[in-house]
Image: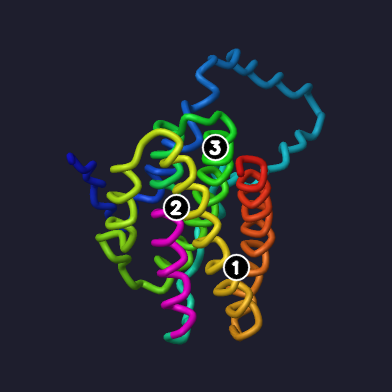
Amino acid sequence: MKHTRLPRFAPGAVVALALLAVGPVIGATKQPAAKAPARPQPGATANPAPVKPAAAAPGKRAATAPVNLDRRDRRFVEAAAEDGSTDVALATLATDRANDGRVRALADQIGLDRTSLSLEAASLAEATNQPLQNDLPGNRLYRRLAGDGGSHFDHAFVDTMIRRTRNQIDQFAHEAHATPDPQIRDFANRAVTVLRRDLGAAQQLRTVRE
């Protein structure tokens, strides 16, 4: 049986996964040229236009300043970034392989949610000045799912995401209570909300399919 080989992800590869999951870039339409500002009348005082701060790119937070995390927190954000990358890869596989349209819809939702979480976790991990691992720990899992097909793949994907999401909820909830860092706590609490939504959708789908 031929196995699909998952390419290695470099430290910044989660950004590429985000672009793949979200889709084509929107906004190619040219904007009309701005009009030149009118010359001030003699004796009038020119009021400078207020300068607005630059907005962060969609799907990303503003650059995070280096932080001093303890060993547990550093391991947590690194693992969260790598787990998110694995989930995005699994979801991308499911959007191509799943037979059931409901499974593909679930994979789309999971892919978008985990892309966002993985990007933020990677940003926090990079702020520690610690490089991420190049190899995804989920390679073996990906290869196993890639070898399935038909309804068996659909069933295996849903079960896999339920199991992984339950474990992730436990990990994020524990971190939210244990970390002394307010930034990590906020990230973990928001992630738990997203993961519980994904878990509920996957469990509901499995019940309907049985």
Using the image, determine if residue 204 lies above or below residue 48: below
Q: What amino acid does circle 2 point to?
A: Asp
Q: Residue at x 28, y 56 (%)?
A: 139
**At numbered mark 1, what does the secondary structure look like: helix, strand or loop?**
helix
* 11 shown above or below 131: above
Residue type, mark 3 in image = Val
Instruction: Using the numbered discs, state the Cα–Cα distance from disc 1 to disc 3 in whole angstroms.
Output: 21 Å
Label 2: which secondary element: helix
- Foreground: 2 or 53? 2
The numbered mark, 2 or 3, whose residue comes first in the sequence reads 2
Crowding around mark 3 (Cα neighbors within 10 Å: few <14, some 14 to 19, many 20+) is many
Q: Circle 2 is placed at which residue position?
A: 87
Q: Label 3 belongs to which residue? A: 103
Q: Earlier in the sequence, mark 1 or mark 3?
A: 3
Residue at horizontal 56%, vertical 29%?
A: 101
2 to 162, vertically: above or below: above
Name the image quarter holding residue 32: top right
Residue located at (69% from left, 60% from top): 193
Bounds of the magenta span?
72-87
Q: Which mark is residue 169?
A: 1
